[in-house]
Image (cartoon, rainbow, N blue to C red):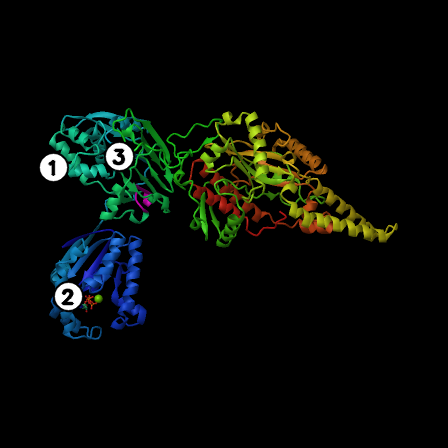
Amino acid sequence: MTMHIPEFALVLLVGPSGSGKSTFARKHFRPTEVLSSDFFRGMVCDDEMNQAASEDAFELLHLVCEKRLRLGKLTVIDATNVRAESRKPFLELARKYHAQVTAVVFDFSAEFCHARNQQRAAERPFGPHVTQRHAEDLRRSLGRLEDEGVRRVFVLKDEEQVAGATFERYRLPMNKRDERGPFDMIGDVHGCLSELLALLRALGYTLTQETAADGAAFWRVTPPEGRRLVFVGDLCDRGPDTPGVYRLVIDAVERGVAFCVLGNHEDKLLRWFNTPDKVKLTHGLAQSVEQFEKELPEQRARVREFIARLPSHLVLDGGRLVVAHAGLTADMHGRVSGKVRAFAIYGDTTGESDEFGLPVRLNWAANYRARATVVYGHTPTLTPEWVNRCICIDTGCVFGGKLTALRYPEQELVSVPAEKEYAEPKRPLAPPPQALVPGGQAAPAEGHAGGHAASPSPAEGASGERSADPDLADVIGRRTIETRFAGKVTIREENAAAALESMSRFAADPRWLVYLPPTMSPCEASARPEFLEHPAEAFRYFRSEGADRVVCEQKHMGSRAVAVVCQDEAAAARRFGAEGESGIVYTRTGRRFFDDPATEAAFLGLLRDALTRADWWAKFGTDWVALDGELMPWSAKAQELLRRQYAATGSAATAALAEVNSLFGPGGTELAGRFAAKAKAAERFVAAYRRYCWPVNSVADLKFAPFFLLATEGQLYFDRTHEWHMRTLAELATAPQVLATPFRVVDLTDPAQEEAATRWWLDLTEAGDEGMVVKPLEPLTRGRKFFAQPALKVRGREYLRIIYGPDYLAPEHLGRLKHRAVGAKRGLAAREFGLGLEGLERFARGAELRAVHECVFAVLALESEPIDPRL
Ligand code: CTP
Ligand code: MG
């Protein structure tokens, strides 16, 4: 006897003690696949025979069984299993995890089993009543196993049958893990042949007219090299040419260039094929029936066979891609059960109906957290929307919408419009819950002012959930975030906890936080005796990273500020879900820059006017702009630091040193000289920090120096040079409060240019400026190993007094300070930059709030890494 079992199954061995279950299990299964009650008895009490340990042993056995089934592992239960109550927990687990249950019954007489046990009396020292009872229980069980939920029962009646039995494990029809793609998934066609042809052509497929055996003409599709089609089901009903669509798809599937899953309309069509009298011709089935009645019976039979064999869903690309007509939660991927089938073709319905008489659906995708991408159709929407890693590509072609394809792995959406409205939708085609965001649109808008157009991605899901608050579960604990530019970034649990504390207490509404800027490392300590930092080291770094052209920007001594400026409140509501606000200015740690809403509003007004004057709304085709820059004066944010640290140091030093120096009198001793120098240093220290402080009475006293255009609607600008950013942002400097930052582009292969830039830095810093920031001309410059640092700062000699103390330049201090390690800070900057960019990209392509916030949160979490704060 050959026993066919699916690759994922629960096998129950059923038989009296001594019937040969363990021996059989050893012969046919891997030791790890077999869970034997004896083994678990031994495990809990060292004695496999101790019946008193049975309860504990089974508790463990059930637990291990559950773990295996959850993981989708074939599991064999080696216990007598002759009583319904002992089988029950296994059958429940099998139901829960959609495992198909096979029973192998050892229908041997009590006497025979007892005789065998006599041979091993040391192990089974019991009387004949034991096997007697087992045999009786077995007898009672035999007729009812199927009713209990066992799918296949194999009964072995004698030793010969046992010896001749073999297992053949078969692959489940949905398991196409070996198919790696690339794929083009096609949404619900519903008989729209003409649109299907147009879409296939748009995807680069070749179409030829062929003649079938029955003389009918049909379309044969030939894919571009290596690609394959995957239809999400519902090929039939409502539309003009359902039979033509099936001819094309069946031919393609038979030739191995397409896959197809079962849709609910197919399921009903199949019922009509099988029992036409019992099926109501509603929901567009009437059109299909009318069209099929013109086909020959053989062709109808062919379609029926085809549908009957369609899998409920498909698991592709090593499990990374799942296609199901109405979607599928992760616990059902690759599994077979009535529940899986129902979910895959009807979706997650509550059983209730809405005002249009349509089933109310639960939003399973909103809770989806698994790694596999799920592509589905079934529920027509105006535009496909990513929700977590799930996307519905039914864009209601038959209702006059579009026919949409999703290319995988590219994640590109391609659509063609319907030629007409073939059926009237019961419920008007609605945009996805937040069609406001650009992500997921079939054809991403062309960049208005250029820049890279955002395309949706499943990495993080999308628009539908924008309004949802971030979930605590998404930020606590140790987390790893996959970024495009910095690879995997891991956040330690304690850092996440610190960030959570800070975010929840101080941060602005997460809907506004689309980006947190990275930290910035200084250049290495200078080799020159009179400098701690000098441009030469920054230039050397970028040269060694292969970035021959850099931009040097004057570093304003202010506070980093991200400004999101919306054209009006409507734009803010649309894009950021904000109410009664039209923008925000926030700090590097996600806090609102201004405590007073009126100040913030006035300041945003200033920026908005500058944007309007520069005609940026039209120029960038946007109604909001995100800018990264420096806000001055520094004292506006750093009051506390100023008072407690700098002013205190300055006044103490000035007062004390004046006293000390007055005691020295006029004589020129060495000690007096040293203290005179200290007094001078203290004076310069005070002068240094004072430069960056001025009183702020109104927004007119503030200054903002933007240096990077982060994003506009659907666009990022990381592919533009910093020179482009500086020149473009200079257009905004039309009010005294908006500064155009002085900068210069330096070709590092030309020593003269490097020297001129160094001179420029010396002039700036000797006049008391903080220093400069050196950036690779291309913001995303690949360095030797990873991306080059996004920026290095080179701070001036005078300014550094604020950081390292008034007399840090004294040789005894400078020598010590030069031993500083910038590696950790740079690693941090790289990861933060990668995360920041990742978050912004997610935002630009309309990912859901949770996915954007995850990155923003991670940047903040990294900020609690212990790093020398003076760097
Ligand atoms: N045996 C045998 N020939 C077989 C199968 C089993 O001689 N074809 C012997 C085994 O060597 C063992 C005894 O019969 O000594 C019982 O077999 P076992 O596989 O241990 O039976 P189980 O059904 O597992 O018994 P229990 O429920 O007591 O574990
Ligand atoms: Mg046994």
User: Magenta span covers which residues?
Assistant: 317-329
Specify the amino acid type for callout 1: Asp
850 left or right of 798 in image? left
In the image, residue 820 above or below residue 76? above
Q: Quarter of the image containing the N terminus?
A: bottom left
**Depth order, front residue of 157/63:** 63
Question: Which label was assigned to residue 257?
Answer: 3
- Which tag is nearer the camera, tag 2 or tag 1? 1
Q: Under tag 3, what secondary structure?
A: loop
Q: Position of residue 701 (x, y in %)?
A: 65, 35
Please tell me whether mark 1 or mark 3 is closer to you in this view.
Answer: 1
Tell which circle, 2 or 1, labels the residue nearer the N-terminal end. 2
Task: Please identify, in this view, whether the residue under mark 3 or under mark 2 is nearer the observer.
Answer: 2
Residue 486 on image: x %, y %: 48, 43
Judge whether residue 592 can be spotted in this image.
yes
Task: Using the rendered image of the protein, determine whether residue 487 is visible from the camera's viewpoint.
Answer: no
The residue identified by callout 2 is 137
Above or below, 210 against 673 in this view is above
Left or right relative to 450: residue 91: left
In the image, residue 37 lies at what x, y percent? Answer: 25, 66
Q: Amino acid at mark 3?
A: Val
